[in-house]
Each structure stands twice: as C-alpha cells, then as structure tokens.
Image (cartoon, rainbow, N blue to C red):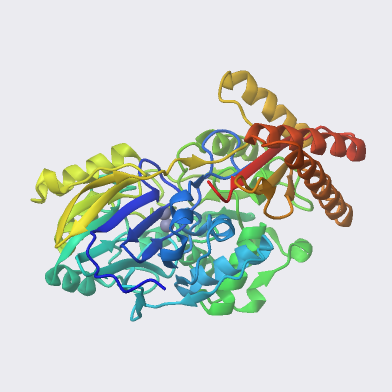
Amino acid sequence: MESKNIFSGPIKIYALGGLGEVGKNTYCVESDNDLIILDAGVKFPEDDLVGVDYVIPNYSHLKDNQSKIRALFITHGHEDHIGAIPFLVKIVKIPIIYAPRLAAALIKQKLAEQKIKEKVTIIEYDADSVITAGEFKVSFIRVTHSIPDSFGICVDTREGRIVNTGDFKIDLTPVGPEMEIHKMSKIGLEGVDLLLADSTNAEKEGWTPSEKNVLDSINEIFDKATGRLIISTFSSNLNRIQQIIDCALKHNRKTVILGRSMINTVDIALKFGYIKVPTSMIREVETMGDLKDYETLILCTGSQGEPMAALSRIANGTFKGLRIMPGDTVVFSSSPIPGNGASIQRVVNQLTRAGADVITNSVFVDIHSSGHPSRQELRMNLKLYQPKYFMPAHGEYHMLKLHGDIAKTMGIPSENIFILGNGDTLLLKNHKVTDGERIPAEDVFIDGYDINGVSTAVIRDRKILQEDGMVGVLLVIDSKKNELVCDPKVFTVGFVSYGDYQDHLTRHASSQVRDALEELFVSKKVTFNDIKNTTRSVVSKYYFRKTQRSPMIIPLVMNRNS
Ligand SMILES: [Zn+2]
Ligand SMILES: [Zn+2]
C-alpha cells in the first residue's frame, strides 16, 4: 500500500481535445493523486467523408494515469462533449460518469446502441449537486445553450479554483430554465483563479439572439405556408422542437417525425418531460397520407445536408413514401457547421428543383439562433467570473486568439492569458498559473486513407462509397502483448439493409479478421500497417465473395497500450 503523501505538486490543467478546433472537447484537471476529466467529445472529419469515421483524442496519458482517474464530468449532451465516451471507456476504466439528466439518457442510449460491454456507472447531477472526486470538489452552474440541461463546471482544488463554462449563450429570455447568472457572479466574487470559456462565436460582435426570437419567424412561416411544411433542425435542440410543435398545434397541423436521431431524441425528451406534446399531435409516417397537405408538419433530421439523413433522402427521392411536390415549404432551422456548406447547397438545389419553396436562415428570417456566446456575452461572462487567469477554450485558433484579445480589453494582463493547443499544460499552484510540459494529445483516427494525392484519392473514395458503401473494422489491440484485446467490431455504412443477413455478414467478417490477425500475431511483432493491410485484404475478399461488391474497407486500430 502506498502511504498517504503530503500533497505538494501543482494542479495540472490541460486539454486532450477542444483547442484549435471545434470538436472532441476533453479537458482534464490532475493532481499528484487524482485526475478528473471534463467532457469526452468526438470530432467529425471535415472533408467529404463526414459520417465515415470519427476523430478522437489520444488517450495515452489517461491510460498511463489510469489509477488516478476518479470521474468523468459531462457538461451537456452534444456529440462534441459525449461522442467519444464509447471509445474512452474501452481504452480507460472510468469509475463514474457524472452527467446532467438529458446527457445521461443520451449516453446510455449511445452505449446501448454500440453494444458496449464495459461496465459504466452514470450518475445524474443537477444545479445543486456538489461532488467530491478524490481531492477535488466539483459543483455546477446551469447555463443556456442549444440543448436542455447544459452546465458550467466549477472545480475547487487545494491550489485554487478552476471554472469551465461549458458551451453557453447568455439568453435572458430562454425557452427553458434560466441561466444561473447570480451563481456566476457569486463564484466570481469568491474568486476564480483560472477560467476556461467557450470561444465558438468570438468572431461575432454583439449578442446572440434569444431562442425566443426564432419563434416569431417560425410563426410567420406557418402563417404563410399553404401546403405541407417540412422543417429540419438538430435533433438535440429540444427547445426549438418544442417551439415548432407549439406552432403546429396553433396552426392545426399534425407532426410527423422522421430520421432515427430525431425519433430517438424526441422519445427520450417526451419520457423525461423536456418537451410536451399531446400524443394525438404525432402521426406515423405510414398514416401521413390521411392528412391534408395544410394539416401536415414534417419534422426531420438533415439540416446539415448529411447524405443519409431524412431530408437528403426526401430531396433526392429515395425516402420511401415521401416525395417533394410543388407547394411544399422546406425550412432549414440551423446554420451550417463549417465544412457542410456544399452538402447543404446540394440538398437545397434538389428540393428547389422538385418544386419546394426552400427557406434557409438569413438576415431576413431568423429561423436559427446560435447556442454560443457572441462578443458581448463573452465580455459579460468575464465580468461575472472575474478570473485571474484565462484560457480561451472550445474553438479554432483564431477564435481562441480573439477571445484572448477580448479578455485583454477587460483588464486581464496578457501574461495571464493562455492561448494553448491540445496537450499544453498549465500548472496551478497557490493561486498562480504557469506553463507546464506538453503531453501527447494528437488526433487519433486510423482509416487507412492516404493524405498524399488527396484530390484523386477523394474522388475515387467517393465513388467507392457511393456505389459500394463502406465497411469499418474497429480493432483494439495491445501492442505490448501483441494481441487483440477483443473481437473486431465490423460495421457497415451505405449498404442496403439485408437485416439478419447483414448481421450474419458482419459476424463472419469479424471472426475471419480475428483468425487472420491471431495468425499474424503469432508469426512476428506486427506493425499497425500489417494489421490494417491484413484486415483490408480479409474483409474485402469476404465481402466480394458474399455480395459481389467492393466496399471501402476502413480499419480503425486503437492501441490499449500506447
Ligand atoms: Zn454544445
Ligand atoms: Zn460544444
């Protein structure tokens, strides 16, 4: 047994993801004996392979410090904060995940969907919770954002106080519960040593419009529409969904919900009371034909032009039982995530060509309001917390830099402002913050996809994906022991669903890969490339034999021992 140390080292604060990017938010607070993680997000690749695979942080530092990990705290249920949990729990043992109620429900659903066998304990917290995790005391500040149940996190340590705002906007007329501005100010008065804050909208002057503003524009669209109304938005934006459904109720339209994530999230939201809808309002897609056009509202996924989402399939005529016709009004109630512009434009064009009246967010219609703080809110945030040291978070480099500049104009000395990258550490000791050493925190995504000669490769890959779909193989290996940690997980995208036969194919492909790799491991010390090449060759032969197709094979290798 280890004897009880006298705690003496500084507290380390660092991001494994979330700095220099919008995505895979993962912030850590670590002392000599304890380590807590704030969020475990995923990032989606920016190029045209969106939806093909994920980018996650390198978790090797967490793996090396496994015995110190006390808990993972989640600020809210967006993918860039919870999406990597299925990967993280496979690589590192997380004793407890603390999450707000909605995020907890979404995490449970995600783990069940991905058939995660690892035991994961999830405990819900609320605005009044105070949680002791090792030597850290953790409390929460309710914020307004584009998903209900969003929180900032306050971590009290023996060396000082750290606050992470999480994603937020300061919405003074919110659709859901109020932001706890009084609590922010109280925490600020008590003293904040280091503040980490959301930088996503640091380029936008002014104040992000309230979610309530969206209501007027949506109402107007309902007033004007004479045919069917099709509205797409993010499935997690439940306050928006509630407003849209309320409008439908007022205008005597019944709601048909399309798209798997929309159906799932609305289910959870109804169960926990995040949205309230009379059941007679909701219609199944099968009975949609019984409704008159002017009685129909279709609420669906696909506002980002994602090719497999309901709206894209409706637009290109491949959605069963639903085709666009003249008189339909289609509304994109979201703004494009950087990189999605071209996909959205393609869907807009297809819809317009089919005769629909398409409405996207513009200066003329506020059918979307961001969930992130613009510059006035960032100033307000800094004013309330009054941090001694400041670290802009959640944003690309330019956003972090601008956020740092705002802090300077608010009187924080520039030597107290840290514009960092993933893996840079800060040391907090006796209420002072200094730079620490770097730890590994690069992107992890292994897709066998050569960056060289991108243009032709991308076009070739797109063609393969379009015609033959893809097969992903997730391999967790232990490079020290030279063995597979668990059976390869095979999943397909873009295949016509053969139901049971599909399961049969993935099961058999998995066991063939396992056998081939076991043989490979016996023969020699293998490299990642050996593993990928063997996997590709086994899987592509197998799928060609069974389906006469040549899908793209993407092995994702994760090393439990790196
Ligand atoms: Zn968010
Ligand atoms: Zn976020």
Describe residue 19's horizontal placement relative to residue 476 as left or right. Answer: left
- Evaluate whether residue 327 shows in this view: no
Q: In which quarter of the image is ligand 1?
A: bottom left
Front residue of 379 and 302: 379
Q: In which quarter of the image is residue 305?
A: top right
In this view, the residue in front, 319 or 31, is 31
Q: Measured from the top left, where is residue 96 in percent x and y?
A: 48, 72
Q: How many marks?
A: 0
Nearest the camera: 481 or 342? 481
In the rendered image, the vertical position of residue 77 relative to residue 554, given as above or below: below
Task: Residue 379: name its quadrant.
Answer: bottom left
The residue that appears at 53% across and 46% down in the rendered structure is 562
Q: Position of residue 36 (x, y in %)?
A: 38, 64
Q: Is residue 286 above or below residue 315?
A: below
Across and down, in percent, residue 286 comes to 79, 63
In this orientation, which residue lies closer to the viewer: 450 or 336?
450
- Image quadrant holding the N terminus, namely bottom left
Residue 114, horizontal then vertical, whole percent: 67, 60
* Residue 364 seen in render: yes
- Residue sitting at x 62%, y 25%: 458
- Where residue 51 sits, quadrant-wise, is top right
Relative placement, left or right, of 160 versus 462 is left
